[in-house]
């Protein structure tokens, strides 16, 4: 299955005789035919559940309910393991085909909240379970749920995130689910971003159902995994990817591609003056090609290349008339909003609310043409007004992550939020608030 | 892979024998299918234990001898695979005791060689593993002294972590990766295709205003008095040889 690759410049021209900063979008999508004839790859999952003392008060029961729903949605081709952890680690159900679901779900029936949080120990036990089948024809992923701060075993964010990245290179990806207001969002989002999965959170355990559905819809719709993009430029043109995708195997590791969604990255190219032409409309090449490597659902490795990107060299009068591409503008606005929200999250954590207010003011300028940024800001402004540090910091952090990494639906509108009753998979829906389930918004 | 494993097992389809004979047969099968066992060597006591916990069917009695069959071979191999997968003995017994032969064959042929991810799990769970090891492995090796790069990398990571733990570590990691990617591209443009930059820390000692000794930092740090004397002797001999060569040139 061959992915579609589009390279879309923000402006259709270079300003002659000047050093140019050129942004362009790289967009990957599955052909419509692939969506129709889609045969999904079987899943190889480990569901890793925090059963530390703080999961009491109904949170553990709700997490178990979500895990059981996940098991119910698996097919016989899939595999699943259940791991629970506090300061001890238990493999409640070792990796097994999802044939006898009542047997698997029974493994979730005897979990009681107790003890401390060896998050790393629990996670790596989950990795161990999926790793046996990670080179077979599966999508291998660990789903890690925690409501707390890692306080046993390895706790260093940098080291754990580095391990997640190593496993991503060995075909085992990690998605994380933070629950409540006291989990370590820095650690959980770092694990998801470095681990090639997704990061979610729910303010209450009931809010977890959306992320579980979202992840499951996504996993079932994946058409290309292990996606890397390498850029081949001209002369002294330099490139910077504005999304925070990790670097791996000689390129940038893009998110996996699902049917019906566009995976994207915005690249900023610095074009030196001598390559910007003479202003007579001649085409100046900036990008020779982007090489995209990925593995499809049948396990076949592919390497495809984009078209070159060449822009006409224009005099100032013509260059000033260019209208920026709407799609690229939207993605750039979301990336900038993402950066601001990330900074605001850190500022709130430091208690620097003046800085938070200033950043939100800055973000408002981006919201004019983008309903999602506008709706997200409303939520953040509410938390900022009430000086609710944990809620603000978490919502800001997770919205930021979503805005810089999300898959885009071509059905979505700039002015109307996605209605959940539209026929749109959960992973494509833009939520106004990440930490709450849709019906509460 | 599965076909090959099935053939190995089917070679023993008509086998029957004592516990002692079964030990050598299962050892052979496990070797044939490439199964690296978890450190438990098959032995007669283990076979009898598996019978007692109902993982294996009871052997038939022929006179005084307990005789095992192909079914028990399948049960044993299936059990070892399940135990390697993390199943407790009681759960293993549930799966092997009443399973039809076909199901046992499926289980006994499900062994897969270790994957890259499993090797990583083993590494990260090793109590002797340190993050420094990982940093060193990720670095290109210098031809004559990889320790230097390793020390510098470790120091810089430690500094990053100690200076400001609350900073966004992930962002820093991505920034570092992006910077490294940019560096590699820039190096390639000046002919350095390997992307390896040699970095060495030196300890410099000004013996007088006209004499400076430079020693690589790690060697200086572990130098003892004997080494200092040997260095002194080496310098003396090198200088003497230079003086002799200079005098010869003058002649």
Image (cartoon, rainbow, N blue to C red):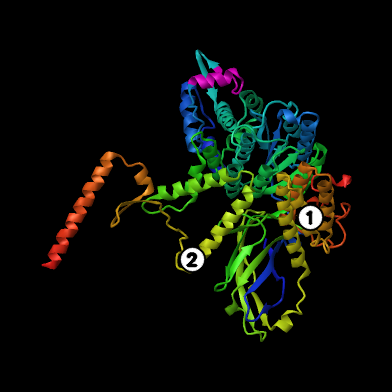
Spot occupied by residue B144 in the image (x, y as percentages of width and height): 36, 52
Q: How far across and down, in percent of the image, does residue B191 sit?
A: 45, 67
Count all numbered tags in the image, as a single digit.
2
- Asked if residue A162 is among those painted magenta in the image, a careful observer would answer no
Q: Which residue is mark 2?
A: B188
Q: Tell me where residue A288 sits by quadrant.
A: bottom right
In depth, the one of B242 and A236 nearer the eye is B242
What element does badge 1 sit on? helix
Contact? badges 2 and 1 (CB < 8 Å):
no
Viewer-side residue, A22 vs B166: B166
Q: Is residue B127 left or right of residue A252?
A: left
**Residue occupying image coordinates x 77% and y 35%:** A63
Instruction: State the image quarter where residue A364 is shown.
Output: bottom right
Q: Secondary structure at mark 2?
A: helix
In the shown orientation, is residue A387 left or right of residue B8? right
Distance of label 2 from label 1 (alpha carbons): 42 Å
Q: Which residue is mark 1?
A: A360
Residue A429 point in image, percent of width and height: 81, 53
Chain letter for mark 2: B
Chain letter for mark 1 = A
Observer-nearest of A201 and B35: A201
* Viewer-proximal residue among A16 and A361: A361
- Above/below status of A151 relative to A326: above
Give the answer, above or below, for where A106 lies relative to A224.
above
Range of residues picked out in magenta: B44-60
């Amino acid at each position: 299955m061959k992915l579609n690759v589009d390279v879309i410049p923000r402006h259709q021209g270079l300003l002659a005789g000047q050093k140019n900063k050129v942004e362009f979008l790289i967009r990957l999508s599955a052909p419509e035919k692939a969506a129709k004839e889609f045969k999904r790859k079987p899943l190889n999952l480990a569901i890793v559940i925090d059963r530390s003392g703080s999961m009491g008060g109904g949170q553990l029961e709700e997490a178990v309910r979500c895990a059981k729903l996940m098991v119910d949605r698996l097919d016989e081709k899939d595999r699943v393991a259940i791991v629970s952890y506090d300061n001890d680690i238990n493999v409640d159900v070792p990796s097994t085909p999802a044939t006898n679901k009542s047997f698997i779900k029974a493994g979730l029936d005897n979990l009681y909240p107790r003890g401390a949080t060896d998050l790393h120990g629990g996670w790596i036990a989950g990795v161990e379970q999926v790793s046996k089948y990670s080179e077979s024809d599966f999508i291998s992923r660990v789903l890690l749920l925690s409501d707390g701060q890692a306080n046993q075993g390895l706790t260093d964010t940098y080291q754990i995130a580095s391990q997640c990245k190593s496993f991503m290179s060995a075909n085992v990806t990690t998605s994380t689910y933070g629950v409540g207001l006291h989990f370590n969002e820095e650690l959980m989002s770092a694990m998801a971003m470095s681990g090639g999965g997704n990061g979610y959170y729910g303010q209450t355990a009931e809010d977890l159902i959306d992320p579980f559905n979202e992840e499951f819809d996504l996993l079932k719709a994946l058409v290309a995994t292990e996606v890397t993009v390498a850029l081949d430029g001209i002369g002294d043109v330099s490139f910077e990817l504005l999304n925070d995708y990790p670097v791996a195997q000689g390129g940038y590791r893009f998110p996996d591609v699902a049917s019906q969604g566009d995976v994207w990255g915005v690249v900023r190219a610095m074009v030196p003056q001598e390559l910007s032409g003479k202003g007579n409309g001649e085409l100046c090449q900036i990008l020779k090609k982007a090489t995209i490597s990925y593995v499809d659902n049948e396990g076949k490795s592919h390497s495809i290349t984009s078209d070159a990107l060449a822009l006409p060299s224009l005099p100032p009068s013509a260059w000033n008339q260019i209208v920026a591409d709407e799609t690229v503008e939207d993605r750039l606005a979301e990336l900038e909003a993402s950066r601001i929200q990330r900074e605001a999250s850190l500022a709130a954590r430091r208690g620097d609310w003046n800085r938070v207010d200033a950043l939100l003011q800055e973000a408002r300028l981006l919201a004019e043409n983008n309903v999602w940024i506008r709706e997200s800001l409303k939520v953040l402004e509410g938390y900022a007004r009430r000086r609710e540090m944990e809620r603000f910091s978490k919502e800001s952090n997770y919205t930021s992550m979503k805005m810089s990494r999300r898959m885009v639906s071509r059905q979505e509108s700039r002015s109307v939020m996605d209605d959940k009753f539209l026929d749109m998979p959960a992973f494509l829906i833009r939520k106004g608030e990440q930490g709450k389930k849709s019906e509460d918004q | 892979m599965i076909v090959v494993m099935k053939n190995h097992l089917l070679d023993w389809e008509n086998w029957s024998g004592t516990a002692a004979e079964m030990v050598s047969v299962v050892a052979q099968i496990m070797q044939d299918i490439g199964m690296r066992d978890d450190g438990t060597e098959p032995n007669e006591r283990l076979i009898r234990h598996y019978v007692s916990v109902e993982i294996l069917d009871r052997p038939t009695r022929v006179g005084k001898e307990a005789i095992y069959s192909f079914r028990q071979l399948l049960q044993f191999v299936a059990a070892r695979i399940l135990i390697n997968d993390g199943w407790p003995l009681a759960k293993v017994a549930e799966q092997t005791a009443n399973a039809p032969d076909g199901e046992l064959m499926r289980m006994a042929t499900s062994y897969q060689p270790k994957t890259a991810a499993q090797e990583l799990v083993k590494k990260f769970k090793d109590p002797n593993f340190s993050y420094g090891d990982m940093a060193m492995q990720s670095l290109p090796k210098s031809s004559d002294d990889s320790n230097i790069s390793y020390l510098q990398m470790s120091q810089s990571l430690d500094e990053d972590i100690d200076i400001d733990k609350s900073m966004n570590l992930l962002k820093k990691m991505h920034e570092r990766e992006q910077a490294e990617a940019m560096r590699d591209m820039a190096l390639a443009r000046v002919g350095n295709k390997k992307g390896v930059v040699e970095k060495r820390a030196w300890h410099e000692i000004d013996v007088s205003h006209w004499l400076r000794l430079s020693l690589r930092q790690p060697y200086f740090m572990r130098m003892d008095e004997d080494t200092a004397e040997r260095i002194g002797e080496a310098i003396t001999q090198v200088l003497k040889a230079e003086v002799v060569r200079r005098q010869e040139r003058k002649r």
